[in-house]
Image (tube, grey):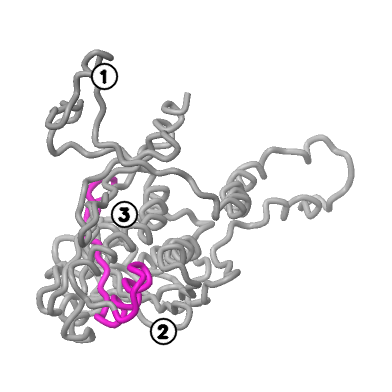
Amino acid sequence: MSDGSLSQDEIDALLQGTSGSDFGGSASGSSGGISDEQKESFRSLITGTIESQRSNFSMLVSKSVAMQAPAAQVTGADQLTGRLPDEVVELSLNFTDGVTGRHLYILSSEAAVRIAGPMMGQDGVELDDAAVNALQEAFSQISGPVVTAIGDRVGKTVLTDPPEGRIISKSELELPQGEEFVALTYRFTIEGEDQAQITEIYDASVVTAAAAQTQPAQQGGGAGQQPMFGAGGGGGQAPNPFAGFGGAPDGGGGGQGPSVQSVQFPNLSQQNPSVEQGNIGLLMDVYMEMTVELGRTKKLIKEILGMGEGTIIELDKLAGEPVDILVNHKLIAKGEVVVIDENFGVRVTEIVSPMERVTNMT
């Protein structure tokens, strides 16, 4: 709806936990439809993460990236595949905890090569397993701000599966069947390249869970506009925390005690993340030592002196356990060992919580 309002039938259906309207002609299924209001609420949430996504994207490809706020559409599997090229790259990061549902990115071969090439330091890179591995790493990082934003919205810790990528025909896409889902379309431009497109898919269960938690003050922020986020794009910023001081309804007059209240404190706390982000930008080019630790053990000096070629050292990790990822000798994440061409790598599977990181530092 252009004015964002719901009909009485739609309101009654939402109160019953289902949708009585047909949006886009898809089968209603057990999960019901996705209303325009839910779609716009969810799109607004994702738009607020675009600058963080763009920043991660730029660091991954080591080039300037411009990224447009997404267009959102409620659609079905048949309608979406009819608009895709025959060969695509599917990158799946399904939600498993906090909220559950399918979540995947779809790229054309050309868009996939434009992202994988700079990451691999090659021009004209072939779209092969090595390129898909690079894309898995890229979209694991790009999706991070989105996962965090959805977790903040639903008030839970939200986790996804490790990314899985594959080069397939569009008929093999693992789209939600028999129900509507939201497709977000991003347009991006990597420095020196033509504009390309990313399509992102969210299950109805994810969209409705996040949209159901919308606060009235958050609704309608920037819906319908698609600014380009680049070197200073600022959509979705928190309101000025000082906007209420000096313009009080009582006329702004003078020294009465009751006019000094703590009502503005929540806005001040909302502003802190953007202040921290601005300050931390000064440190972005500082190198830090990153170590991947397979395991540890303790040995007596006499055992160490007795070591020779062929000695087997038993570690404190079981086969198949995640390896520890340390930054400046502090644990920040866990992962699994992978092989990229002839080199070892590690795929991050778990980020250590801030509380655990603080505990490790003490």
Q: Secondary structure at mark 1?
A: loop
Whole-Å distance between the Cαs marked 2 and 1? 55 Å
Which comes sooner in the sequence, label 1 or label 3?
Answer: 3
Q: Nearer the viewer, mark 2 or mark 3?
A: 2
| Residue topped by disc 3 | 209
Disc nearer the start of the sequence (2/3): 2
Q: CA distance from mark 2 to mark 3?
A: 32 Å
Instruction: Inspect the magenta stretch and tell me whether residue 345 lies in it.
Output: no
What type is the residue that disc 1 sits on?
A: Lys
Residue segment shown in magenta:
95-124
Residue 7 at least partly seen? no
The residue mark sitting in front, 2 or 1, is: 1
> What amino acid does circle 3 point to?
Ala
Disc number at residue 298?
1
248 and 134: which one is in front? 134
Residue under numbered circle 2: 195
Nearer to the camera, 230 or 294: 294
* Residue beneath the point at 15% across and 80% down: 78
Residue 30 horizontal/vertical position (percent):
14, 61
Whether residue 332 is visible: yes
Look at the numbered discs 2 and 3 and tell me whether their residues touch, using CB distance below 8 Å: no
Please say if 291 is above or below 252: above
Residue 287 at x, y = what percent?
50, 49
Q: CA distance from mark 1 to mark 3?
A: 48 Å
- Tag 2's secondary structure? loop
